[in-house]
Image (cartoon, rainbow, N blue to C red):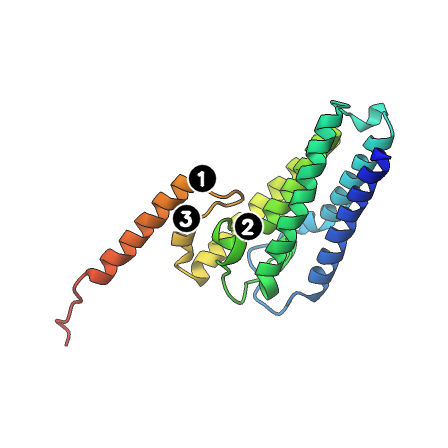
Amino acid sequence: MILYAQTIVLLSLAALYLERYGKKNSSYDKERKSVGGGLSLFAVIYKPVILLTFIVSVASLWADHPLLLEMHQSDLMRTLGLVLATASSIFFVVAISDLGENYSPCYDLRKPGSVVKEGIYSYVRHPVYASNLLLLAGLAVMTGSIWNLVFFAIVAYFYVSSIKQEEVELVEQDPSYEEYKKSTGMLLPLPLRNREVKEVRLSSSEDSVRRQPHDTSHL
């Protein structure tokens, strides 16, 4: 009974991501300016990698085969991994919603209409990537499969490459993005204390600029 429930959860997660990405990837504005050189290789391998991740995950629930390269058969680890993967779907839905029409896939980056800094983006600059990595990490923990660890590493590498391209463009588009970076985490929220200190410093810096006397010699 537990195996059936776990399988249903996995298939539901796959269906959710497939449905959301299907809509977004078919409807994003391709007329917007392209950012960077794109990640053409990732465009080719991304779907097979995600598909293989879910295949390995489901197979690990029902089979104990050497080709799965599993490092554990722990029920506790399976439950923990499934909880992480399920939590990732919540962050994913929120992040996609907050991003709105500014979405574009990382392998075909497009300049956003506006820089989103509200909602979940007030804590993390790239929550869509973060939620996807949490999903893959959860599935790796659940299965203990070396294959899923490899798939996680591949996606993480391309996401970091994409982030570097994105943030160069975003700083050019909105110079205040550089300050925004200081008060947010790239993929994980900053520790509360660090976040508060940085926000205070930023606020103090902005106040000091506003209080400086203006040069009126040209008047």
Q: CA distance from mark 1 to mark 2?
A: 16 Å
Query: Residue 57 placed where, x, y %?
Result: 79, 36
- In the rendering, which numbered label is found on residue 183? 3
Q: Vertically, is 66 above or below 150? A: above
Give the residue drawn at x 73%, y 62%.
Answer: 23
In this rendering, would 65 be left or right of 160? Answer: right
Sequence-first tag of 2 and 3:
2
The answer to which image quadrant residue 50 occupies is: top right
Query: Callout 1, which amino acid?
Result: Pro
- In the rendering, which numbered label is found on residue 191? 1
The answer to which image quadrant residue 84 occupies is: top right
Whether residue 29 appears in this view of the structure is: yes
Q: Vertically, is 183 above or below 152? A: below
Q: CA distance from mark 3 to mark 1?
A: 10 Å
Give the residue drawn at x 64%, y 68%.
Answer: 29
Crowding at label 1, few (<14), some or many (≥20) Cα neighbours within 10 Å? few
In this rendering, would 201 be left or right of 161? Answer: left
Q: Which residue is mark 2?
A: 126
Query: Residue 9 placed where, x, y %?
Result: 78, 43
